[in-house]
Image (spheres, grey):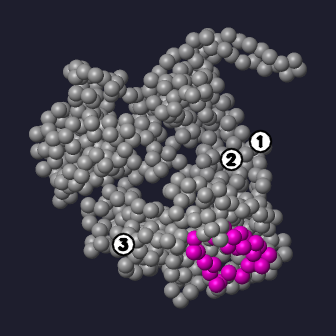
């Protein structure tokens, strides 16, 4: 039976230690400077799955190096100090097979930050990693304590993201001829390339992209012409042969701004974005016009799946997911629907991962021309849809994004029928015999919109869609200022005053703000003493405080709360290039730090609830709501 071993290494100049947790057999192993003990543990679990946090880039190479008789400190410095990849240190690492699975999120978030989101203790060891002598027994035990803590937190993160692991494991089970358990630690894009049997190829036609024959642009054909112009420009400049950094900069610099259906739009090589210029709030006959599985459907319909693939597994994955989704939508119970939704996850991840893999030079699925064809035609097809919908009297576009639109039409049968007919005609024109490209019309009762990346809508059945930093649904590993998200959503959905939401909450974790000191700064100072009061202004007099004393910290992560105690000042990052202390973004001018566990901790009297109320109102104002 395959089991999972969680592990973490700590490396010093003269010492190393590691903690391993076998949760299935309920055993923990602490190994200190003992290669033989490590070898015995490895050999007993060589075919099991080794799970860590950033172990894909760090811990596995430390472990393999020790097993090979190498100096772990030199490997550590190669990775941490020199900033190089672990596999570059020695080809001998390939002699030690390990099935590694990394729970670090992508894009990366540090373990201490995740521990903070979870409400755990985020205090750090006081034993410096650059110590130039063997550790004392007390220092070793303190390091073991923090290493055990990190392993326990890695286990928590693993369970919070178990659906990702299960999806990757599901891919292995679904395609045993293409991938094995050893591939479970690969990225979604790389494992997808293996499922498709991709063979790495060198392409010279990145900018030979073409426009699909289904396009019927007239009013906004200038956008298509702009992409055609960029194609000629790229070919004449030889962008294909630019260095990776130069090519990335060229792509990023290309954008075309135009007003479409009365709202500003930006087109480029990454996607389409358009939204009302000012924050907006709409009620009435609103519709989310969503393209179902847009990119996967387009790739299959127009034969744009990576040319590096050697089989038709992408289409098989697509059809399998479609069949599972049908079972989900036709389930008799919520439990049954949840089961079929979960079963789709491996296939959904593969379908969505391919587009990124096609633009990644290191991925076997690399096919930049087809990726360009997909991104460019995807935008133009949606622009085509907008152009045709614009003929509806009273039509209003609220926003456009990469795979759909939000629109408003008059609340009449005639307007809806015309919209439905236009959408049907677009579907027929854009679909092929290989695959249908279909639209879904979701009725919206009300929408609050800050911009194209931040909005909330309530559908006719009371369901809520929440997109963006201020209103998104948070989780235990994405849990920053949760009280503000809750206050905004409660106001927008139920009309609950933000004061009521904030003043009635008594869980301290709901008010936490996590900050982390970047490598650009050296230390942190907290203004903490009786301040000197200053006043300035003539007609409007403002009061501000100067704190002559600070408390210095060397931790990386801090859990910050607004304080009503005048002795608590700002939390400052120091030692940066600017030469002067700088306040951490989105933190109060008066705050306290609490890095102990906040699980079950109630709100203390020193918490300044008014700061959170004011912040909630500021954020509502960003959505065009004045309260």
Residue 627's label in the rendered image is 1
Q: How far apart, in angstroms, are the residues tagged by discs 3 and 2? A: 53 Å
Residue at image point 20% right, 58% down: 2
Residue 199's label in the rendered image is 3
Residue at image point 68% right, 57% down: 452
Q: Is residue 38 left or right of residue 465?
A: left
Quadrant where the C terminus lies?
top right
Magenta-drawn stretch contains 209: yes
Quarter of the view holding residue 378: bottom right
Residue at image point 58% right, 75% down: 209
Q: Position of residue 6 (x, y in %)?
A: 27, 46
Q: Secondary structure at mark 2?
A: helix
Q: Are marks 1 and 2 in contact (CB under 8 Å)?
A: yes
Q: Which residue is mark 2?
A: 491
Q: How far apart, in angstroms, are the residues tagged by discs 1 and 3? A: 58 Å
Q: How many marks?
A: 3
Q: Are marks 1 and 3 in contact (CB under 8 Å)?
A: no
């Amino acid at each position: 039976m395959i089991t999972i071993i969680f592990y973490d290494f700590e490396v010093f100049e003269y010492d190393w230690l590691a903690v391993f947790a076998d949760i299935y057999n309920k055993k923990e192993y602490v190994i200190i400077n003992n290669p033989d003990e490590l070898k015995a543990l490895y050999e007993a679990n060589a075919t099991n799955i080794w799970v860590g946090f950033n172990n894909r880039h760090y811990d596995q190479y430390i472990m393999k190096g020790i097993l090979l008789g190498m100096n772990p400190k030199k490997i550590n410095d190669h990775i941490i100090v020199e900033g190089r990849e672990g596999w570059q240190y020695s080809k001998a690492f390939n002699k030690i097979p390990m099935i590694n699975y990394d729970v670090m999120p992508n894009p990366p978030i540090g373990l201490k930050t995740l521990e903070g989101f979870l409400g755990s203790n985020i205090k750090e060891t006081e034993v410096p990693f650059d110590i130039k002598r063997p550790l004392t027994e007390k220092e070793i035990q303190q390091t073991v304590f923090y290493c055990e803590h990190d392993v326990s937190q890695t286990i928590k993160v693993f369970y919070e993201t178990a659906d990702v692991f299960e999806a990757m494991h599901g891919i292995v089970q679904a395609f045993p001829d293409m991938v094995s358990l050893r591939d479970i630690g690969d990225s979604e894009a790389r494992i997808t390339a293996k499922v498709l049997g991709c063979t790495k190829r060198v392409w010279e036609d990145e900018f030979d992209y073409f426009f699909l024959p289904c396009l019927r642009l007239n009013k906004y054909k200038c956008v298509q012409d702009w992409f055609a112009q960029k194609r000629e420009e790229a070919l004449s400049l030889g962008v294909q042969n630019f260095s990776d950094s130069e090519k990335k900069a060229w792509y990023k610099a290309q954008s075309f701004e135009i007003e479409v259906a009365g709202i500003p739009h930006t087109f480029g090589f990454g996607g389409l974005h358009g939204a009302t210029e000012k924050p907006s709030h709409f009620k009435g006959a609103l519709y989310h016009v969503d393209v179902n599985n847009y990119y996967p459907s387009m790739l299959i319909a127009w034969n744009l799946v990576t040319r590096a693939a050697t089989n038709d597994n992408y289409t098989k994955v697509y059809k399998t997911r479609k069949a599972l989704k049908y079972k989900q939508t036709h389930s008799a119970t919520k439990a049954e629907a949840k089961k079929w939704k979960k079963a789709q996850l491996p296939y959904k991840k593969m379908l969505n991962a391919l587009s990124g893999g096609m633009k990644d030079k290191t991925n076997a699925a690399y096919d930049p021309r087809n990726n360009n064809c997909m991104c460019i035609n995807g935008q133009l097809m949606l622009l085509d849809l907008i152009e045709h919908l614009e003929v509806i009297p009273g039509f209003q576009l609220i926003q456009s994004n990469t795979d759909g639109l939000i629109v408003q039409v008059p609340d009449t049968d005639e307007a809806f029928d015309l919209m439905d007919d236009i959408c049907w005609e677009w579907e027929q024109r854009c679909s092929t015999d290989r695959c249908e490209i279909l639209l879904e019309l979701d009725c919206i009762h009300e929408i609050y919109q800050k911009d194209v990346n931040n909005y909330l809508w309530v559908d006719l059945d009371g369901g809520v869609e929440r997109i963006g930093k201020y209103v998104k649904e948070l989780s235990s590993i994405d849990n920053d200022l949760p009280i503000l998200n809750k206050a905004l959503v409660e106001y927008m959905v139920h009309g609950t005053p933000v004061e009521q939401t904030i003043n009635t909450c008594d869980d301290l974790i709901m008010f936490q703000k996590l900050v982390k000191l970047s490598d650009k700064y050296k230390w942190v100072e907290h203004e903490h003493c009786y301040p000197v009061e200053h006043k300035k202004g003539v007609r409007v007099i403002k009061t501000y405080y100067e704190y002559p004393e600070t408390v210095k910290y060397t931790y990386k992560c801090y859990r910050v709360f607004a304080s009503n105690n005048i002795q608590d000042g700002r939390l400052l990052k120091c030692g940066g290039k600017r030469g002067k202390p700088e306040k951490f973004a989105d933190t109060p001018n008066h705050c306290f730090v609490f890095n102990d566990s906040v699980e079950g901790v109630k709100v203390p009297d020193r918490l300044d609830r008014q700061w959170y109320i004011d912040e909630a109102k500021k954020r509502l104002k960003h959505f065009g709501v004045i309260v």
